[in-house]
Image (cartoon, helix red, strand yellow):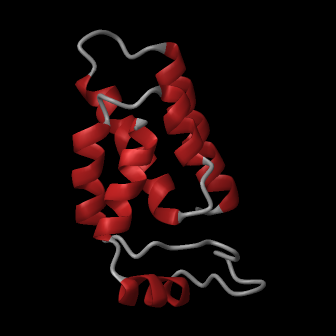
Amino acid sequence: MSVSTEIKQDLEILAIPEKAEFLPKFFKTGKGEYGEGDLFLGVIVPDQRKVAKEYYNKISLNELSEFLSSKYHEHRLMALLMLILKFEKSKENPSKKTSSIFISSILISLIIGI
């Protein structure tokens, strides 16, 4: 089983249906609103941080990139949290690829408001 599949399964287990129903209203995901089209699993941020800490050193940058472009809010946030951990925990200078993906993700987030 791939790391991506394991992460998705862990997030599905942690999902709270009531949160998944509430969050689209909170983040204004209706037509014409700033979060239009965003989807939610219903995973709270502390749980996303736990998943990020468990998998950040096991996931490849290519797999991480897939999460960054996911339609699910929690996937994107967790991927950003993993990139931060990879950057902070790097024993050497962070690779140009890690830095590039991280900076690109932040810029995209700012531009499209995710």
Residue 103 left/right relative to 14: right
Identify the residue at the far top of this view.
92
Q: Is residue 36 above or below residue 54?
A: below
Where in the figure is residue 3, as x and y percent of width and height?
39, 37
Q: Residue at x 40, y 76 (%)?
A: 42
Residue 105 left/right relative to 90: right
Q: Is residue 55 above or below residue 43?
A: above
How many labels were placed on the picture?
Answer: 0
What quarter of the picture does the N terminus occupy? top left
Q: Residue at x 32, y 29 (%)?
A: 58
Residue 59 left/right relative to 25: left
Identify the residue at the far right of this view.
32
Instruction: Say which of 13 and 67 sits in front.
Output: 13
Q: Residue at x 70, y 83 (%)?
A: 33
Q: Residue at x 69, y 87 (%)?
A: 30
Identify the residue at the far front of this view.
1
Q: Is residue 48 above or below residue 6?
A: below
Where in the figure is residue 18, as x and y percent of width and height?
37, 90
Where in the figure is residue 48, as x and y percent of width and height?
31, 58
What quarter of the picture does the C terminus occupy? bottom right
Residue 100 left/right relative to 41: right
